[in-house]
Structure formats: structure tokens, C-alpha cells
Amino acid sequence: MTSATAPRLALRYAVAFPALAGLLLWATSDVALLAPARAVWLDATAALAAFAGQALGLVARQDGLVLFHPDGGAIRIVQGCDALPTILVFLAAVIVAPAPWRPKVLVALLGAGALTLLNTGRLLHLLSLRMGDITTFRTAHETLWPVVLFAAAGALYLAWGHRMARRRPA
Amino acid sequence: MTPGRLTPARLVLPLVATALLVVLIHHAYAYVLAPIAQVTQPSAAAPHDVLADGARLRVVPPKDGTASSPAHRFVPIAPIALNLPLLVLFWGWFVPGRPRTLLALAALLIATHAVQASLEVRQLLGTLPADGQGLLRFWQGTGWILLPLLAGTIAACLKPRRPRAPTTPAATTS
């Protein structure tokens, strides 16, 4: 990157990243046309959590979007439980990053997969807390996990960005 | 956009600051937002009390018998306020310096928290007009995270500030 093109790249990034992230977030939260796709993603999230939970003995059965703990507690997976906003913000940051397309596609897939797995862990953790103290459940659900998910997305991007910067010729 | 060297301090310090802010929001922020949500209710509505209750706002109906059930309703604080610790985290990781800009943005976010808490209480009470409901829905789905991302990205893309010239008078030679 030469000194003349650096400000232009930075400007492009400053405009493109928030614009793309905003478009993706708005489209998946408010556009009715995308509701079926969102429903499919929710179903997949529930199915993955049920599969992993049954393998670990944390899920007794799944009924649609509801997961049941062997001890009787249950959680319903609703819009917002699918980590989609976090994944979309991460993908927007990767897509507009000044890097070749091949590593971008790779890190987009790996990052989205890692965040999906982390969200599966989150759902199983919340299910295991469901039978206990409701305050602990609320703290984990409303406060801790949203920050952990966004922090994980930021850390993934930070690590990838520095890796790309190290590879770039001076 | 990843300026500067990735040192352990640059990785860990923003995480520590974020954790402290999350704890603060969880235990104390409701005491800041409750009075604001209380005084910004429309005067025509029955005067509900808005009280801090841990990490939630508790909306208590008036004692004149006009209350609708359920008696107490709640607005969780964390979904309103978590963009502040996230702003601090991402600022620490991606933006080189600019602490005064960060403080100004944090003040702006706190103002949006006050507005959002007020709107959410009004929505809970059924006194929020349709326009306000649309705005609130957009903010909850997109705006709450987009505003800090936009501000942080622009700040990260700006040129680093030049160090100020020394203010001490130049030494004279005789």
C-alpha cells in the first residue's frame, strides 16, 4: 500500500464497513422477504445445539425451537439467540477489508463457523443454567454472552488483520 | 484496519476495561436510567414509578387502583447499554489513542441509552406512538451497534494526530 493510496483505502473502509454492516443488520431484522431465510437459520441453530447437547448429555429432546434439559428445564430459541448480528458484523468487516479475496473467503467461513460454534456453547450453557437461580441465568443471557460473542468476533478480526498486515510487503 | 503493534497490553487492557464497565452496568446503571425514564413519561399517562432493580428497570403501577396487570413490569438494562463496553473494547483494539473522542462518543451513547430506556418504558406502558415504535425497533435491531461501529471505524481510519509542539518558550541565546 503506497502512501498515496492509504487514505483512499481508509476512507473506503470507513464508509463501506458501517454501510454494509448496517445494511445486513437492517435487512435481516426488518425485511419481511428475508424472514424465511432467518427462520431456516434459527432452525439450523436449534438443530446444531440439540445435536451437540445430546452428544454431551445436556439436551434430552428437541421440540422445534425448544430444547429440553434432562432435568426438566427448557429454553426457546428466538430471533437474537442465533448470533446472526455478530456474524454479520464480522462478515461485513472481512468483506470490505483491503485483502485478497481468497483469504477473505477462508476467514469469513472459518470465523462464521467459529462464532456459530461459540453460540452453540452459549445456548447449552444457558440451558444448563435454566434450572438454577434465575438471576444467574439472566446475567449470563443478557449481559455476559452478548459481550463475549462480540468480543470473540473482534478478536478474530484483530488476529486476522495483523496476520495479513505481517504478510503484506513493506 | 489494525494500526500499531499487537502487544499483550493492547489486547488485555481493553478487555479489563470492558469487564469493569459490564460489571458497572449490571449493578449500577439502572440507578442512572430509572430517574430519567421516570421524568420523561408523558404527563397525560398515569404516573408509574420507574425504579432501579439490579440490572433492570422495574415499572410500578400507580397506587390509585387504575393499574393493569401484571403489577410490576421490567425493562432489562443490558440490551440497552452493552454498546458502551463494546465501544471501549473495539476502540482499545482498533483505534490508536484519541481518548477525548472516545469520551465524547461515550457521552453520546449514554444519551442514547437514556432515550432508549425512556422509549422502552413508554412502550411497556402502551403510550409510545407508532413512529416511536418504528424508531425503537430500528434502534434495537440495527442502530445500537451500528452507531459505535460507525464512529469507531471513522476514528480508526483517520490519520493519527501529530504530537503537539512544545508550549515552553524557546531558549534564547545570548
Image (cartoon, coloured by chain):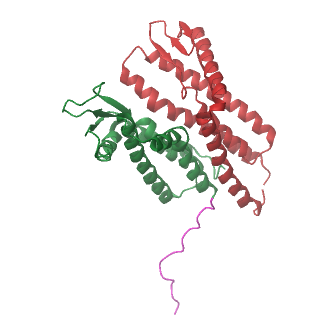
Chain colours: A red, B green
Q: Could you say which quadrant of the image residue A12 lies in?
A: bottom right
Q: Is residue B143 magenta?
A: no
Q: Nearer the viewer, residue B147 or A116?
A: B147
Q: Is residue B106 above or below residue A131?
A: below
Residue B21 location (% of width, % of height)? 42, 42
Residue B18 location (% of width, % of height)? 47, 41
Could one spot residue B92 in this view of the protein?
A: no
- Magenta span dominant secondary structure: loop
* Residue located 49% across and 57% down the image: B99
Q: Nearer the viewer, residue A138 or B68?
A: B68
Residue A152 location (% of width, % of height)? 58, 34
Q: Is residue A63 above or below residue B136?
A: above
Q: Which residues are magenta?
A: B158-174
* Residue located 78% across and 60% down the image: A2
Could one spot residue A110 in this view of the protein?
A: yes
Q: Residue furthest bottom?
A: B174
**Left or right: B88, with A50 as reference point:** left
Q: Nearer the viewer, residue A15 or A7?
A: A15
* Residue located 76% across and 64% down the image: A4
